[in-house]
Structures are given as structure tokens and as C-alpha cells.
Image (cartoon, grey):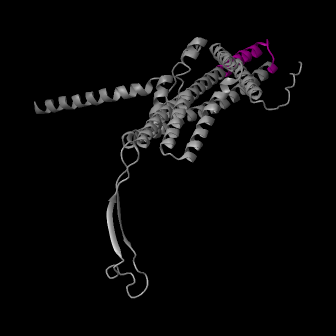
Amino acid sequence: MVPALAVCRNAARLLLAAAALFPAAASRAQPLTLEEALKAGEALSPALAAQRYAIDAAGHQLGRATELPDPRLRFGIENLPVTGADRLRYDRDFMTARAIGVMQEFPNPAKRAARGERAARLHEVEQANLAAQRVLLRRDVAIAWLELHYAQRARDALARVAGEYALQIDAVAAGIARGRQTAADSYTLRALQEQANDRVIEQERIVSRARIALAALIGEAANRELAAPPDVAQLAPSGEALLARLAAQPLLRVYDERESLARAEAGLARATRNRVVVRIMETLNNLLAESRAQTLKQRGRPEQSLEGHEAVVAAVGRRDPEGAARAMRQHIDSIAELLRDGSGSSHPPRRPPASA
């Protein structure tokens, strides 16, 4: 009975090991979705990790900013002779004194409150930076994933074309044997097949480069096969929905928090009662607010910007890459024209497009 019991125990261990291995193997075999790639990119990003540490560091300063400065220990020797018979002796000359003590600074309450406000605003800035970096990272991962996906689709399409040429070559060979076709037809098809094979090889290089670019963002997960792309029809929100979410845009929130930080620093400068520092901080704060608001003061800027974005999204929804690129170029040109007109700078008139 003992050998039988040992066999049962070994069989149980093998079953447990297989149960532990099969899910891992199944997860590796599953296609990589876009959402999984985005999560992998966020988990492996050193920039996001560094920004989280920056948030922790700023958070630790929240309580300390309003506290009194640390007391300082002071000690030394005053009036120590450096010449004569008592040179460097501290125990002979009655003018030589040894001093030791603790010094504590007591900043005014307004200054301590201003320091606390600045620390709170700095913490908010770091949090906004994390959200903005996360958005940019997700954009980069999505672009890399889509580039790899469509590079693979182009490679597969070219491979099918090369296969079709191979079938036609076989059919032409039978036609030549029956006298229905000439050798020139076979040579033409073989030349086309070689061109298709060359394009397949070139597209394989493009796929490899796209996979390397994705692997730089998400690691080994880029070696998995890709799943089907998401529905691009979801990329067509209404203009009202875009405007409603505009205030929550992470990149814009960074500027909001930086303005709040600038105001807090100006308040800290006023609390120091140093007029020079106050003037400098107020000037910098005004320049920051003016530079941000300047782009929205141009006449028709918000409406034209929204129309340009909607044109790009509509082209993407139609699966029209040329139309999307054309709409983006037109949008950039129109915004640049508005900025030139709004700044009042002189620029040469644009030449009319050449007629076809």
C-alpha cells in the first residue's frame, strides 16, 4: 500500500503543476488587445514611476511646510588670539569666549501659511503632471499598437497577392503546354510575383520595426499576436461632448495647476515683505496667464479649432488615412494663420495655389 500511496501523491503533484502551468501558457497564447497593451505600458513606464515618486515627495512636504524651521545648534570661539604667546590658546586671554547654544527662527504666521499653500499647489501640479504623462504614454502605446497591427495586415495582403501570382503561374504553365498561352505570359507573371515577394520582404522589415517600437513601451508583451482593433466608430463624439470634456483635459489641467502654483508663490513673496521679490513674482504670474489666454483671444479660434478636430476624427472614422492627414495639415495651417494674424506680425502674403 505504501508504493500505491506514493504513486497517488506524485500524480497529485503533477496535476497541480499542470494546473499552474496551463493558465500561464493560455495567457501567452491569447492575442494582445489594445487595452492590455495600454495597461502594460503604464505598468512598465519609468517616467510614470518617477512621477509617482515626485508626488510622494511633494506630499511629504504638505505637513512640514507650515511647521517651524528646525532649531540650529551654534557653537564656536570668539576673539581667539592668532599671534603672540597666547596664539591659538582659548584659556588664557580674558577676551576669548566659548559659546554654545540653540537658535530657533519664528517666521510670521502669514509666511508659514503661504508656504503651506505653495506646498499644496505644488502637490496638485505633480498630480496633474502624472495625469498628463499617462495620457501621452497611452497615446504613444496606442499609435505603436495600431502601426504594428496595420503593418501586419499589409504584409498579409501582400503575401496573398504573391500567392495569387503563384497560382496564376501554375495555370499559365498548363496553358502553355496546351498551346493556349505563350512564354511571355509566364515571364510577366513571374516578374510580378518577384516584385510582390520583394514587397513582402520589405513589409516584414516594417513589421519588425513596429514590433520593436511597441516592445520599447510594453516589454515582452509585444511578442504576442495582436487582437482585432477597436471599433473606430467610437472616435466620433459630438462637438458638444468634446467641449464638455475640455476642462477635464489633463494637459490643460497642468496649466491650471501651474497658474495656481504661481499665485501661491506670489503670495509667499508678499508674505516675505520683500517688494522686489513681490514685483518679480507678480510679473511672472501675469506673463504666464497672458501667454495662456493669448491663443484663445484670436477671433474664431475656438470654433475653427473644433471644426479642424472634427474633420480629422471624421476621416479616421471613414478609414481614410489620406483624408485624415490632409485634414490635419489644413487644421495646423489654419491655426498658424490665426496666430500670425492675432500677433500682428508682418508676414508675406500667401501665394494662391497653382492651378492644375
Q: Is residue 168 magenta?
A: yes
Residue 152 in the image: above or below residue 122:
above
> Residue 306: percent from the left, percent from the top?
65, 17
- In the shown orientation, is residue 76 left or right of residue 14? right
Residue 244 rendering spot, x and y as whole percentages: 55, 15
**Which is nearer the eye, 284 or 204?**
284
Residue 266 located left or right of residue 197: left
Residue 89: percent from the left, percent from the top? Answer: 35, 81
In percent of the image, x 89 and y 19: which residue is there? 355
**In which image quadrant can residue 247 be found?**
top right
Residue 278 in picture, x, y percent from top left: 55, 43
Quadrant for the C terminus, please. Answer: top right
Judge left or right: residue 354 versus residue 247: right
**Frontmost residue, 14 versus 247:** 247
Which residue corresponds to the image point at 56% horizontal and 45% vertical from the top-left?
A: 275
Magenta-drawn stretch, dominant element (helix, strand or loop): helix
The number of callouts visible is 0
Q: Is residue 266 magenta?
A: no
Residue found at the far bottom of this picture: 85
Which quadrant of the figure has residue 352? Answer: top right
Residue 100 can be seen in this image: yes
Q: Nearer the viewer, residue 206 or 37?
A: 37
Name which residue lies at 36% across and 44% down. 67
Q: Could one spot residue 141 in this view of the protein?
A: no
Span colored in magenta: 160-184
Q: Residue furthest right?
A: 355
- Seen as rendered, the residue at the extreme left is 1
The quarter of the picture where the N terminus appears is: top left
Q: Is residue 291 left or right of residue 87?
A: right
